[in-house]
Image (cartoon, helix red, strand yellow):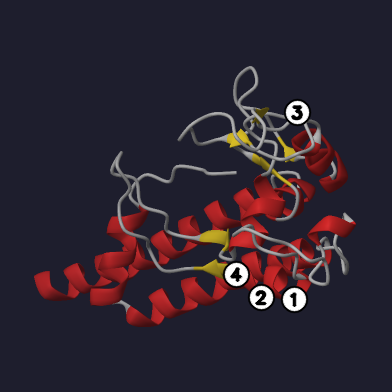
Amino acid sequence: MPTEVVGAVALRKALSQYAPDLAKELTKELGSILKPIVNEARSYVPLTSPMSGWSPTYNQTGRFPKYNALEIRKGIIYKTTPSKPNRAGFVNNIRIQNKSMIGAIYETAGRKNGQGQDWVGPNGGGASKGVSRSNNPYAGNQFISNLGQLYGSKRRGNDHRMMGRLIFRAWAKTQGKANASVFKAIENTTDRFNRRTEIVDVRRAA
């Protein structure tokens, strides 16, 4: 799903400074591309918990969040403002994200290990993270199986980071059309901005 667009950050800075009307139009156009995908992703959220032990009425102990369809839907949003640079220096100019913890769990569970976390039992594993301490040795596998398949494309081997059940499923359904639309919007705005600055330069020279 992530796609690198060279020069997009510089373009948006230039638009904000010299052509705020074009900046506003681009933001609106990008939003019109992303909003249907957000709505599609929200439509995949099950109304009720995929398993009884995850439902809000279940007498659950610990910090694991309970299933809440409304919270998951509300947490699926899009952003058209640049993010802060990550460790590699990349900036997300536009993105769809799953803000709620419960939504992120539903979206991504099973990416790293499709069989669930390694089981160590209630008293095993010491301080280790990423292991299952459930009384049920098959809890992780059952949990992921109940959530259903991951959608999207593998990057290499068993790398499932670009796969998910809501946002990634909705994005995959566009079959690349969303990426193409984003590129087209940015290219068209760039052309309009360049033509405008060329006219200004000609007038100044005259």
**Residue ID for mark 3:** 115
Q: Answer with mark 3 or mark 4, whichever residue precedes in sequence.
A: 4
Which residue is label 2 attached to? 74
Q: Nearer the viewer, residue 144 or 10?
A: 144
Question: Above or below — where is 123 with respect to 58?
Answer: above
Left/right placement of residue 94 relative to residue 68 reads left
Please report whichever mark, 1 or 3, sits nearer to the chain's N-terminal start. Answer: 1
> Which of labels 2 and 3 is toward the front?
3
Residue 116 versus residue 134: which sits nearer the camera? 134
Secondary structure type for disc 1: helix
Residue 77 is tagged as 4
Label 2 vs 3, first from the N-terminus = 2
Q: Is residue 50 left or right of residue 30?
A: right
Where is residue 137, by image quadrant?
top right
Q: Tell me whether circle 2 and circle 3 mark residues in contact (CB < 8 Å).
A: no
Q: Position of residue 169 (x, y in %)?
A: 76, 49
Q: Nearer the viewer, mark 4 or mark 2?
A: 2
Circle 2 SS class: helix
Q: Nearer the viewer, residue 161 or 190?
A: 161
Task: Check disc 4: other Cα within 10 Å, few if <14, some if 14-19, many if 20+.
Answer: some
Q: Quadrant of the C terminus?
A: bottom left
Amino acid type for the residue under numbered disc 3: Gln
Badges 1 and 2: C-beta atoms under 8 Å apart? yes
